[in-house]
Structure formats: structure tokens, C-alpha cells
Image (tube, rainbow, N blue to C red):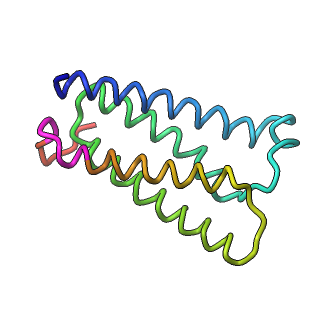
């Protein structure tokens, strides 16, 4: 599979991932049924993931348009996710309440974006220095 075709698939994954993140975060934040069933949430993590979902959509569009800013954007998402994961670890180590699914999801999201940040920085399709998104 050539790199352009592979990146279209990656863009599609980002699109689905972003939409799912926004829908699940929005449900937990803004609907009565979501608020009633969200359990021991960590508010900063919930808000971060909801807002990050919109950046996942921007990343998806950047991939579809083959914009060089995907390198910076994926790195920014990976680094910010790592900081929020560190915050969550600190929250847990202090004995605060949390949901195991939140921890698993943050580890997955952070790993996901680190892997893609490395991929984009090594990719031959994104060699330009400037970012014209």
C-alpha cells in the first residue's frame, strides 16, 4: 500500500476516533443520562478528552489534505495527552477516586498519538518545514 493511500486510512481512523471521543465526552458532560452514569470521573481528564476530540478532527482533515502541520499537531496532541496521563497517575497515587476505564483509555490515547507523531515525523510525505493549515 502506498503512503498516500495509507494516510487516507489513517485520516479515516482519526475522523472516527474524533467523532467517538466528542460523542462520548459530550454525552458524559451534557446529557442527563450521561451525567447519571459517569461514575468516578476525573473532571480534567473528561474535559481534556472532549476538547481533544475536536483536535482529532483537525488532524483528520490535515491528513486528507496532506498538510505538513500534521507533524506539529500530532506531536502537540501526544505531549498534551502525556501530561494529562501524568496528572491522572498523580490523581490515582494520591488515593483519589477514578474509573479503571479512564486509565485504560488515557494510556491507549497517549500511546496512539505517540505512535502517530513518530510516524508522521518519519514519513517522506511531510518533509516541508512550514505549516499552512
Tell me which residue sits at (56%, 45%) in the image.
51
Tell me which residue sits at (52%, 55%) in the image.
107
Residue nearer the viewer, 69 or 33: 33
- Is 125 covered by the magenta stretch? yes
Tell me which residue sits at (71%, 57%) in the image.
43
User: Residue 85: where, in percent of width, then height?
Assistant: 54, 62
Residue nearer the viewer, 100 or 54: 100
Instruction: Tell me the quarter of the picture where residue 103 sits.
Output: bottom right
User: Residue 130: where, in percent of width, then height?
Assistant: 16, 46
- Looking at the image, residue 28 sits to the left or right of residue 59; the answer is right
Instruction: Tell me the quarter of the picture where residue 93 sits.
Output: bottom right
Q: Establish if 21 lies above or below 103.
A: above
Instruction: Tell me the quarter of the picture where residue 96 sits.
Output: bottom right
**Which quarter of the figure is the C terminus placed in?**
top left
Question: Which residue ends up furthest to the bottom in the rendered image?
Answer: 94
Tell me which residue sits at (37%, 54%) in the image.
76
The residue segment tinted magenta is: 119-126
How many numbered discs, if any?
0
User: Residue 69: where, in percent of width, then height?
Assistant: 26, 43
Residue nearer the viewer, 118 or 28: 118
**Which quarter of the figure is the N terminus placed in?**
top left
- Looking at the image, residue 50 sits to the left or right of residue 62; the answer is right
Judged by its main secondary structure, the magenta piece is: helix
- Is 78 covered by the magenta stretch? no
User: Residue 114: where, in percent of width, then height?
Assistant: 36, 53
Amino acid at each position: 500500500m502506498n503512503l498516500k493511500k495509507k494516510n487516507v486510512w489513517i485520516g479515516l481512523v482519526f475522523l472516527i476516533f474524533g467523532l467517538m471521543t466528542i460523542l462520548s465526552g459530550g454525552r458524559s458532560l451534557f446529557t442527563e443520562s450521561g451525567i447519571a452514569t459517569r461514575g468516578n470521573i476525573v473532571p480534567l481528564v473528561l474535559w481534556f478528552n472532549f476538547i481533544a476530540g475536536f483536535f482529532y478532527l483537525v488532524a483528520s482533515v490535515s491528513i486528507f489534505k496532506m498538510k505538513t502541520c500534521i507533524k506539529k499537531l500530532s506531536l502537540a496532541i501526544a505531549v498534551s495527552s502525556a501530561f494529562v496521563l501524568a496528572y491522572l497517575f498523580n490523581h490515582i497515587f494520591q488515593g483519589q477516586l477514578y474509573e479503571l476505564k479512564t486509565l485504560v483509555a488515557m494510556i491507549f490515547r497517549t500511546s496512539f498519538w505517540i505512535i502517530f507523531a513518530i510516524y508522521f515525523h518519519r514519513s517522506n510525505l511531510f518533509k516541508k518545514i512550514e505549516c499552512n493549515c
